[in-house]
Amino acid sequence: MVLRDSDPAEAGGYRIEDRLGSGGMGVVYLARSASGRRLAVKVVHAQYADDDEFRARFRREVAAARQVSGAFTAPVVDADAAAPRPWMATLYIPGSDLGTHIRDNGPLPPHRLRELAAGLAEAIRDIHRAGVVHRDLKPANVMLADDGPRVIDFGISRATEFAASDVLTQTGRVMGTPPFMSPEQFSAPQDVGPAADIFSLGAVVAFAASGRGPFDSPSPYETAIRVVEGAPELDDVPSELLPFIRLCLEKEPKSRPTADELLRLLKDGDWPAPRPTDDTPTVVDTGKPRRPRRKRLWLAAAAGALALAAAATTTVALTGDDPAPGNLPAGWEEWRKQAKDPSVDKDPIGAGAPFNRCVASGGTSLVCAGDEILATRFALADGRNTWSLPIDATADDIGSSSSGGGTIIGTRDGRVYAYGSDDRAVGADDGATAARYSIQSLDAETGKVIWKTVTGDGEEAAEPSSDQGASTAVPEGVITTYGKRGEQFALLDADDGKVRWKQKFPEPNEQICLLRSAARHGYLVCQKWNDDDTAGHTSIAQLDPATGRAHWTIEVAGDKDIVGQADGRLIVLGSTGEHRTLTLINAASHVLTTVRLSKSQPEGSTPTLLRGRLYFTLTSGGVRAVDPQSGRQLWESDSGVEQAGPPTASATRLYLSSISGRLAVLDLATGTVEATLGGRDDSGTVDFPDMAAPPVLVGDALYVAYGIRSAYTVDVRTL
């Protein structure tokens, strides 16, 4: 940051070179000592210099920082709490703070998360051993140094032995940063002890894993209520760290482990079971999971009945492509555009349907697929349609046998996964065709094919559409159907598309098997049907990313499918019939919980999991919000959008759209319709209307697919 005219030339005899940042208490400068050592010098704001209570707090910060100076904090070099403008100099730690790093680079990968968790636990252990409670552990106070995280800023810390008599707390002020504060910091500030830092540690690690705090809400007041009473949102936290974070986020301070216990648990991996609560639903222990007999029916026959989970699990933003809330893409303006026809046929069939799915990728691109388009790019800012690829790249005038006409399987680091379907005639007179299916990794900015892997070639090859459960994106790449008859499933490596492993679908002629993903894990979901076409049971297996074998397998009654994962538990619903119950599967312990819905949801409603809630959308325009942990229906609303596709949510609003482009904006907390936009007729009429693609939110810009191969954007702040 650039120095201002009002900034001092020196502080405490240290020459100031740059401004590092400014906070509520003061300004932090980059300075140098006489020997050339770089320091971070914190200078108190002038308006606080005459405040006796503030000076007392600053003296305490200096004392606390000196007490805990060590390997995991910034050592104090010098300080003067009695100066006209009090200051403190600590060793400068090059690097960014955790909050800035996550905003710029996205969530940390699992191995770095574990390193962060261990480093913070070591830092908190040393802080507590020095007799200090930090009380404001948050991403901005964690510096990512080359040798591990450092905890800084002891501005509201206090010595544990003075907790009960701390007059600075007894004034009634609630001090801290709400999304990362402990429940007792809101409800009983005078009783805050070391356990508060453990709670904050868990919230910080959850933030690093997902890019948002586990209790984030639109206002500090709502955040406080969620911290004290609500369940954390941990959807994007890797399963191996969920036990760590859950223990840290226990509501009762006495139920949280100490920092020493956390370090032992991280080392040994022997996590205790979460503390039961009075409102825990009835748990049915199925005992040791057994491997059922499995089979596979062709996915095309099951596509209609098994579409419920596609909205929640089909398009996965794996790393670096999750848009941050707030603001608009650089150079943004309102636009509506139609994609170019990329067909290479001499007599192309022509456009006639909407996109099946769109995703934001690489920070500048909206990539869509569907209606015989493998993928096409619109610039987020102005809608320029810079490239478009056909799903069938052979000029044979056969068209594509693809049932869905293309979709986006996932997005990763500025790339998108899509699939192609090159068809050819195999008979002279009977019109039979064979397909060569491939999955391709494309550069979102240029459309360049990074890699292309054939997944099946022949009359019986399986179409690798994620909308039909025949492929799914995971951090390691794409798990897809594979082979001449689609009787195998394989992992295609994210970097080069090479087959890393192959496994056979068990008994492929007697079950419907689907490939799903949730919380960065791949799953195989196989439904067993009886001879009289009634549902028998469903097996759900979590796949080992290294081998494709089952880590564990659970069997549940009826025809079920995975909708997603919330709070460490898979959410499983029936794929046909009325929804009266849902099943929760603890991803760590594999324990099943059956939750009865307070109000049954009709057959044909589409469930989507967003921010830990289930939203059932009806073709009539109805929307129902359900808490999956308790089964309670939170609200019911009429959006006015018929045939709406799966919704999209921000922190405060729910967005639904139809193929005509009609848009409804609902309050996430109450279901109240806050705004609507009418449909559009400027891109042609769709002959056979189906479910619309979910809208895409990038900051405050919402992108809506509509009509024939078209999309438009709107600033949600104007709605």
Image (cartoon, grey):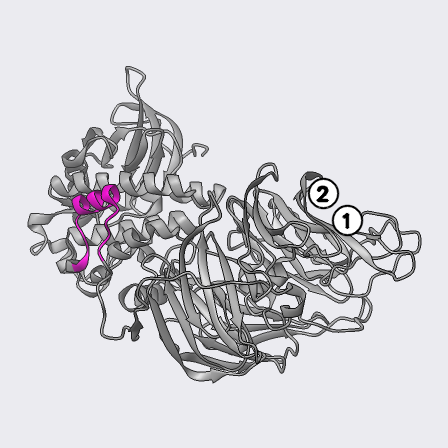
Q: Helix or strand or loop: what does disc 1 sit on?
A: strand
Residue for badge 2:
447
Circle 2/circle 1 CB separation < 8 Å: yes
Q: Helix or strand or loop: what does disc 2 sit on?
A: loop
For residue 118, what is the image quadrant? top left
What is the CA distance from the residue labelled 2 to the residue labelled 1?
A: 8 Å
First-in-chain label (2 vs 1): 1
Residue range in magenta is 255-272
Residue 433 magenta: no
For residue 445, what is the image quadrant? top right
Q: Looking at the picture, tell me which residue is in the foreground, 252 or 296.
A: 296
Residue 708 spot, x, y in % from top left: 78, 64
Image quarter where the C terminus lies is: bottom right
Residue 55 spot, x, y in % from top left: 18, 44
Residue 392 spot, x, y in % from top left: 79, 51
Number of marks in the rendered image: 2
Q: Looking at the picture, tell me which residue is in the foreground, 194 or 283.
A: 283
Q: What residue type is labelled 1?
A: Ser
Q: Which residue is drawn at 23% across and 33% down?
A: 88
Q: Looking at the picture, tell me which residue is in the foreground, 220 or 60.
A: 220
The answer to whether residue 63 is visible is yes
Disc on res. 573: none
Q: Which amino acid does label 2 sit on?
A: Gly
Mark 2 packing: few (<14 Cα in 10 Å), some, or many (20+)? Answer: some
Q: Looking at the picture, tell me which residue is in the foreground, 496 or 237.
A: 496
Residue for badge 1:
388
Most common secondary structure along the magenta stretch: helix
Q: Residue at x 49, y 75 (%)?
A: 536
The answer to whether residue 82 is visible is no
